[in-house]
Image (tube, helix red, strand yellow):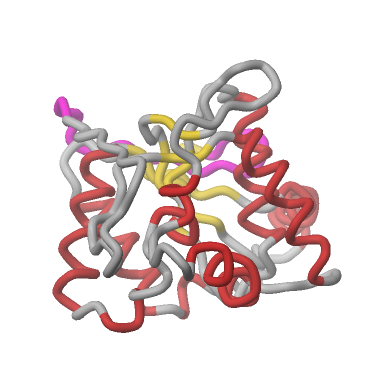
């Protein structure tokens, strides 16, 4: 395991080839699809979506964004948000959706700004990244009705298919994901997955405090 600049911790296990099944549909079934899209969103989409989130106030959580933006926008078609983005591009002509290059593991109790800042910071060094982010990829209209077996098998499959996971770790000195059973499950899937690279990334504003803590805090 290595400590990287910009708040990265990285480990890569069992380096084997992996395959990603990439599929997108212009329309989802009227009753709502259970399929998790093997698709990610671009940094350009994230920046545009952030302008909507700001209308909710200063500190909406990911759950707030789901309830107040995602579900209302997808309720009529009972689909995932990514199902509404097929064929759309940014100002440069680059597709807003693409084959996912990184799976984002995060806690929904975070403010939305926390995983957003991590993804945008990651994109500075990986401008071609497409982020698999459950808020956008999962059909939030039927999520509460899906059985536990669906959650455990499909998320594990996505992690192994994509081959790279970024865990959003915040706050650095009392990380929420290490107290959440689902986040721990995603960590387990990452470490057990064949050829999966697992990264831990702090929000940019916490990197300095983390470095200072390494020098001064020994408890």
Magenta highlight on residue 130:
no
Rendered position, 201 above or below 135:
above
Q: Percent x, y for residue 199?
A: 45, 44
Q: Is residue 212 visible?
A: no
Rendered position, 30 above or below 147:
above
Quick one: 25 or 99, which is closer to the camera? Answer: 25
> In which quadrant will I find the N terminus?
top left
Q: Percent x, y for residue 43?
A: 62, 35
Q: Is residue 186 left or right of residue 172?
A: left
Magenta highlight on residue 15:
yes
Rendered position, 120 above or below 154:
above
Residue located at (66% from left, 73% from top): 61
Region rendered in magenta: 3-18
Residue located at (65% from left, 74% from top): 68
Q: Residue furthest top?
A: 92
Q: Percent x, y for residue 112?
A: 66, 63
Quick one: 42 or 152, which is closer to the camera? Answer: 42
Q: How many marks?
A: 0
Quick one: 218 or 181, which is closer to the camera? Answer: 181
Q: Percent x, y for residue 63?
A: 58, 75
Residue located at (35% from left, 82% from top): 144
Quick one: 26 or 119, which is closer to the camera? Answer: 26
Residue located at (56% from left, 41% from top): 8
Q: Is residue 52 left or right of residue 178?
A: right
> In which quadrant will I find the C terminus?
bottom right
Q: Quadrant of residue 78?
A: bottom left
Q: Is residue 127 left or right of residue 183?
A: right
Q: Is residue 80 visible?
A: yes
């Amino acid at each position: 395991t290595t400590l990287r600049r910009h708040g990265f911790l990285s480990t890569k296990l069992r380096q084997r080839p992996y395959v990603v099944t990439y599929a997108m549909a212009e329309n989802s079934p009227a009753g709502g699809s259970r399929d998790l899209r093997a698709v990610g969103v671009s940094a350009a989409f994230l920046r545009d979506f952030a302008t909507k989130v700001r209308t909710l106030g200063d500190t909406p959580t990911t759950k707030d964004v789901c309830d107040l933006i995602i579900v209302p926008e997808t309720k009529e078609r009972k689909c995932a948000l990514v199902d509404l983005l097929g064929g759309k591009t940014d100002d440069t002509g680059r597709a807003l959706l693409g084959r996912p290059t990184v799976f984002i593991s995060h806690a929904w109790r975070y403010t939305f700004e926390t995983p957003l800042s991590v993804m945008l910071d990651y994109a500075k060094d990986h401008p071609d990244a497409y982020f698999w982010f459950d808020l956008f990829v999962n059909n939030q209209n039927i999520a509460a009705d899906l059985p536990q077996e669906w959650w455990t098998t499909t998320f594990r499959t996505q992690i192994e298919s994509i081959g790279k996971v970024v865990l959003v770790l915040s706050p650095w000195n009392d990380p929420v994901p290490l107290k959440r059973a689902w986040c721990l499950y995603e960590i387990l899937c990452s470490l057990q997955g064949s050829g999966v690279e697992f990264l831990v990334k702090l929000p940019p504003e916490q990197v300095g405090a983390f470095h200072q803590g390494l020098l001064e805090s020994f408890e």
